[in-house]
Image: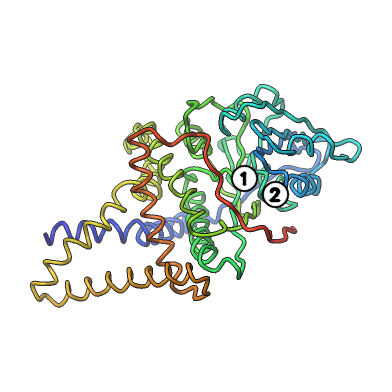
Amino acid sequence: MKVIFFICLLTILYTYIGYGLVLFILVQIKRFFYGKESIEGFQDSELPDVTFVVAAYNEEDWIDGKIKNCLDFDYPKEKIEFLFVTDGSSDNTPNRVEDYVYPAGVKWSLYHSPERRGKIAAVERIMEFVNTPITIYTDANTMVNKMAIRKIVAHYKNPKVGAVAGEKRVSMEEIDSANSAGEGFYWKYESKLKKWDSELYSVVGAAGELFSLRTNLYQAVPKDTVIEDFYMTLKIAMQGYKVKYESGAFAVESASASVGEELKRKIRISAGGLQAIARLLPLLNIFKYGILSFQYISHRMLRWTLTPLALAILFFVNIPLALSGNPFFVFTMLGQIGFYALALVGYILEKRKLKFKMFFIPYYFCVMNYSVYVGFFRFIKGSQSVVWEKAKRLEKEETVSK
């Protein structure tokens, strides 16, 4: 029991704290020997053409703002082509895109099919119309900063870079106390890990809110792929290219309207993560992929497999060990009970719409790991569709400037 206890404890600590510390140390060592990573970038006359793909499904409330946001980019307009793909939308989203009055010289196209087959099917359908060397993807309900395209494109000066991930930011609104506290804290920590991952070698997967790739490296993915952004970018990394992270290019998204709404998204991501792990088994071969395998296992695979299981085992194994009277195991048992009690208080406060954010991070942590269990059963049953129910978001959006 003691062996099982310490294996579980070390797995949990490594996944959520230890990997970050190891990553930080490795990055410092790399900086000591090679200096801090620099980005050469392009001169204005060298800037490449890009295609900016906006995926929108029933986003009539957001699409006008998204178009205005796109037109505000600090990038030569003659070098950008906007593709709006609205497949399956049954509201006025396609009409709003088509009827919008675009400034002279803006290159844009609308692609719409009444059939809803999921985001990846929509993206794959329009990729044959992309004629630029770089493709950038974003969602309709996110606002992207003005300098994003310039910041992303700068990385492609390096021929070893195959994809670039932007940063996802969650708008932290007081009225969304529970979820914005947990989701916002999670994404701040996640962004720091991605930044270090990128500096050490490569990001392991991008978020669909904002990412890009070299168009010639695009590979069609299986039609039932649930988290296509993650799968697409890792397949590029497995070809020997680096996936870089650019915090200066960010997409702001409102937090989910509630933890219950966020749970829908987390379950889908968990099911998709397990699906991706099953399809990316060769990436576990550290002798072939080296540092990429280390990053993938440490940052992604453990979160979606062993660590949620270790949390449950740790609790139940701790009970008889604590009953033996050993002070250390009594302390760890009380610590676990206290943590889950805070999570329970967070749950109760959210239901009553009270704002004590110190309780919401433990609650969000528990929700996040619970979603892995639900996602696992969906993955086993094959019941997670690529056509999924969107989580409701807060209406108020953070202002995006430079």
Q: Position of residue 254 (x, y in %)?
A: 62, 57
Q: Is residue 4 left or right of residue 125?
A: left
Image quarter for residue 294?
A: top left
Q: Mark 2: few, some, or many residues within 10 Å (few <14, many ≥20)?
A: many
Number of marks in the rendered image: 2
Q: Quadrant of the N terminus?
A: bottom left
In the rendered image, the vertical position of residue 223 relative to residue 203, given as above or below:
above
Q: Seen in the image, is 306 located left or right of residue 96? A: left
User: Can you tell which mark lies on residue 148?
Assistant: 2
Pick the front one: 206 or 45: 206
Identify the mark nearer the N-term, 1 or 2.
2
Q: Quadrant of residue 311?
A: bottom left
- Quadrant occupied by the C terminus: bottom right
Q: Amino acid at mark 1?
A: Leu
Q: Residues within 10 Å of mark 1 (few under 14, many from 20)?
A: many
Residue visible at 50% across and 34% down? 386
Hey, which residue is sitting farthest top in the picture?
Answer: 128
Q: Which residue is mark 1?
A: 210
Q: Are marks 1 and 2 in contact (CB under 8 Å)?
A: yes
Element marked by disc 1:
strand
Per the image, label 2 sits on a secondary structure element best described as helix
